[in-house]
Image (spheres, rainbow, N blue to C red):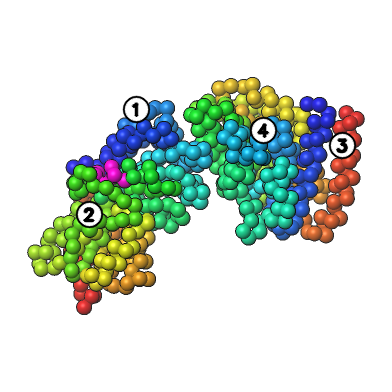
Amino acid sequence: MMSTREAFGKALARIGSEQSIVVLDADVSGSTKTSEFRKIYPERFINFGIAEENLFATAIGLAYSGLKVYASLYSVFVLKAYDQLRIIAHDNLEVKIFASHSGLTNASDGWSHQTVEDVAVFRALPNFKVVVPADAVEADSVTEESLSVKGPMYVRLSRSESPIIFEKGFKFELGRGNVISEGSDAYIIANGNMLSPAIRAVESLKKEGISAGLINMSSVKPLDEELVIKAARSSGAVVTAEEHSVIGGLGGAVAETLSKSYPVPVEFVGIRDSFGQSGKLEELFEFYGLTAENIALSVKRVLERKK
Amino acid sequence: MNREEAKRLKELSYRMMIDVLQMTTEAGSGHPGGSLSSKDIIAVLFFKIMRHNPKNPTWEDRDRLVFSKGHAVPILYAALIEAGYLDRSYITKLRKFGSPLQGHPEWNPSLMIEATTGSLGNGLAMGNGIAFAGKLKKKDYRVFVLMGDGELQEGTVWEAAMFASHYALDNVIAIVDRNGLQQSGPTEKSLSVEPVAEKWKAFGWYVQEVDGHDVEALYDAFKAAESVTSRPKVIIAHTTKGKGSLIGEWVTEFHGKPLSKAELEKLLPQLEEKHIEEMKEIDVN
């Protein structure tokens, strides 16, 4: 078990020898784990205090000057700086945002510290790439790969620890999904913290004689359209699963692709147009239907529609 | 500064004013008022203070100007034309489809447009970023940030002000174009920004106040700012909206409304006459 933010913090300290990297913090480096970088490269670490708009406006000037900016703060506070994020997007700047405490993972803090809409916001911003890694191994690889990604990028990280899914040495590729398991009746396309429950859903469906395939789609933008279409063509039904609003996130991206290229029935597992609240993480995932049981039910529902 | 130098800058300021009026009238929109209140500041910066090279615009050691009051960009475009970054034919290209002369500035270092602005309140922080990078890279370029006075109502200005003094960014020189007016009227009626100087002082800045149309006073203020180290500097330049254009001065409607072609044609000879008088005055004084 390890959180994606912790994996990012370690990886950032590792790639930090690249002299053009500057790391921006809004007084949360202990939480975001950029403190690891700060310990080694204090001169390239800038604390802005609690001033997120100023952080991102300054990031613009740093990026104009040829520096590679890594900004890490709670995802909900990244969104405070929307005006500045638009300029970063417009100018296609080298600003990589690794947002921790995203989704519901800041569980007990409640809705003011949780994000259900961040993926939708960043998908809609031109030039931004959007990535939702599923485990610590993938988060590590995303951090390393981000050095060669051109332009702005939003990476969604979790506060909570999660099981390790990928083997050491796994390499993330922007715009590419990974087939976790093949299936013939339907495909589940999941990312982030929904990948683990999706694996369990596949197993329980198997026991009932249903062959569901599973794809990890951490790269929400650009989406691996080819793989999405292939899954729809081979099985004829798709279920998406994400720890995010069903509006505008992974489900939206998959549905947009399929409706124009290969329409099949799609069911969406995600948060139903509402905000989060305080509670234990398991309680919240249960309440919002972010469970293996609900994914399995959604597969059965989509199979009904397929007939 | 000697008399010839002052006359040269006033001449450039006059030419940029005519450029601005022609550009905005041609475009049928734009912000001539706020452009003209900045004309002498821009003249002194572009043609006397800043180190830059139109033959090598992306020269790494050049001084940067972040044009934070983006709506006044016609005066920047006029300076680019007068300095030779842009061909004079661009006078007809303001706000036209496909033109680099967008309604508000877009980052384009090869044209000496150092930042994308238009949404007020961001330029100072952008300038801080460029200045911080300069310190990291051990470059001695300076970053000038031109702000509007209504812009001081944006909270981000003060976040950036706090940041610049915390990190002792003495390579940042901000200029507040204090023309006293914003879209709906006097700043003090919309949301008072006074006491402006005291606010900047409280944020740890070196503060000067000057007549923003007196090129010699502006030059002296920039020179005085150069000798101050360990903290950022701001020059509060007291100006007149629409300065020099006769009909525009202190008229709020001039903020976002250009002259018609007929109005401009009638005005041009009067402006020239006034300009000749003013140049004579410099000789007398």
Quarter-wise, where is residue B110 in the image? top right
Disc 1 residue type (three-letter): Ile
Q: What span is colored magenta in the figure?
A: A136-142
- Measured in 3D between alpha carbons, the distance from the residue under mark 1 to the one under mark 4, in whole angstroms, is 37 Å
Residue A141 in the magenta stretch? The answer is yes
Q: Nearer the viewer, mark 2 or mark 4?
A: 4
From the image, state whether disc 3 or disc 1 is nearer to you: 1
- Amino acid beneath label 3: Met
Q: Residues under labels 3 and 1: Cα distance?
A: 60 Å
Per the image, label 2 sits on a secondary structure element best described as helix
Residue A255: quadrant of the picture: bottom left
As drawn, which residue projects farthest toward the bottom? A307
Specify whether A199 is left or right of A260. left
Residues under labels 1 and 2: Cα distance?
Answer: 34 Å
Give the residue type at disc 2: Leu
**With A103 as the anchor, is B57 left or right in this view?**
right
Residue that numbered label 1 is attached to: A40
Residue B134 location in percent, x, y? 53, 31
Q: CA distance from mark 2 to mark 4?
A: 56 Å
Whole-angstrom CA distance, mark 3 to mark 2, is: 75 Å
